[in-house]
Image (cartoon, coloured by chain):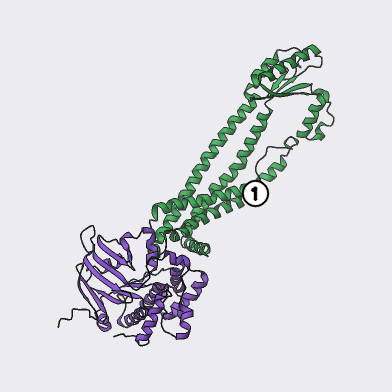
Chain colours: A purple, B green
Amino acid sequence: MPMSTDSPSTPEERAARRADRRRGGAPAPEPTPAASADEEVAPPESGRAARRAVLRPGDGPMVVFDNVAKIYGDGGGGLQDVNLAIDSGEFVFLVGPSGSGKSTFIRLLIKELDTTAGTLSVGGRNLSRLRANKVPYLRRAIGCVFQDFKLLQGRTVYENVAYALQVIGENPRGVRRKVPEILSLVGLSEKAGRYPNELSGGEQQRVSIARAFVNHPRLLIADEPTGNLDPETSIGIMQLLYRINRTGTTVIMATHDREMVDKMQMRVIALEAGRVVRDQKQATYARADA
Amino acid sequence: MRFSFFLGEAWRSIRANAAVSVAATVTVLIAVFVLGAFIPSFLYVQSSVDEQTAKIDVAVYIADDATVAQTNAVEARIDQLTRQGTLEGSAYVTPREALESLREDVDPALLQDVNPNIFPPAYRLDLVDPDDAKSVAEGFAGLPGLASDVGDPDTPGVVYGAEEADTLLRAATFIQWAGLALISILLVAAVLLIGNTIRLSIFARRREVEVMKLVGATNWFIRWPFVIEGVICGLVGAVLSVALLWGVKLSLVDPFVDDSASPLTASGPETIGFVSLTLILVAAGTLVGALGSGLTLRRFLKV
């Protein structure tokens, strides 16, 4: 069951959010002083951004793996015979031992790698057919959070988050409006002027999440976001990801954190030696055979 | 907004890479300085050569006691050469006119007491091709009635300025090639050093570049700051060298020119205005910077 206590969990609220998403506006982040949320948050997509958008709008499956295989040059690692679909708005855990293919799975999604066989679509786009010059636009539609945060070291918290907006051509006014908003969402308003090396791991991961979410992507991918964090901090990060999911964003999270997966009771996709060995709704980290 | 953002990014990178950026800037400074010193010198020499070659005409001096028949024979020959197409034109210059024309080049004060009659009357011949000067001069040399006390020993009565002009032309050509070679070497060095600066800058920021790609930066979004970084190095180098050249001009060239401004240089050869020179040099520096970073990006920033 959801751990976050302040998320809207009634069906009505969820439906409202989904409708919001269909209109093409960005989902409103939490928490919701309902009246002001719309005007403050929804960034109307500019014509240019919309034209360049790679992901097709709609509520179809966000991610479809159709017989996907990735075989590395040396024959090791990789993925084989992966067939699955992830719907818009789902929260999915990707589990499995090291070397089971979790990272490959994620790197295929952001087209850091190309499939060797089969078809992988994200947001209705066949990634094999996506031209190299469109890849940046794909990545703008996908937020990424990593175990090692991947923050820009010479830049403050504010600048790190602003960068993701500057990349997509946001004007300075938009940057000044959106960055503080997202920083308050992740609880880092006070630390906007700090540099990454002055922050704790948990705080750095919050910055990373803020950067990933500031563009309101439809898909958020987290590769072991709590891998370097203590359990207390991990819970905070988890709650944040969950709240982002509740705004309608599809979240795919690779993790080793057994306790967390068991608590959340979300869909679990388990990989082993490059194959999907289990794909189960409301599941736990380990196979619940007992 | 885009541009100011890229400018900020470039500045960030220059600060992070200060020593290397300074080295590249100094190389540009030196190259552009040499270029800036060379251009006026080259133009000066070129203009002197032009002036001299323009003077490679032939003057046929008529003796005071020449008969009408002798003068007519000279004129007939001039007409003949004109018909052949060897001469562009000719003019009869009286002693008074000769003095007047000298007044334009030389301080009139010096010529105050000069008697025009020291200049024998002359025919000035404009040649189509300066190379004909010698043969034309020799053709006149044998004619009677010329002022044989004027002119070269082997062409009495006739003056032409071939040899000096020849030497000058050869010197000018040499200066031209040596200068171009030196400038080419320096500019290539500057391009390479800027390239190296950008390469180090890319290397120092390779992790950042990776992150930029992950958040969806397009290739040119990543490249522009590096290009601007190179251009800034080139531009700053050029501006500094212009300042240096201005200093040199004020402290070394101008006083020298003033002191030696003898009456004979009242109208010297033309060079180039400082403003035009500045524009050329700044353009050159910018180009060197853009070229250096552009070439490096092609090789090292595979995005």
Q: Residue at x 62, y 30 (%)?
A: B168
Q: Chain of mark 1?
A: B
Residue bearing mark 1: B275
Horizontal placement of A176 versus B248: left or right? left
Name of the residue lying farthest toward the left:
A290
| Amino acid, disc 1 | Val
Relative height, residue B144 to residue A251 (above, below): above
Q: Nearer the viewer, residue A20 or A216?
A: A20
Relative height, residue A4 to residue B26 (above, below): below
Does residue A160 appear in the picture of this structure? Answer: yes
> Which percent across, then down, holds residue B41?
61, 40
Q: Which quarter of the picture shows residue A88?
A: bottom left
> Which percent across, then down, holds residue B259?
72, 42
Q: Residue at x 39, y 79 (%)?
A: A19
Q: Nearer the viewer, residue B141 or A287?
A: A287
Does residue B67 appear in the picture of this structure? Answer: no
Horizontal placement of B7 versus B85: left or right? left
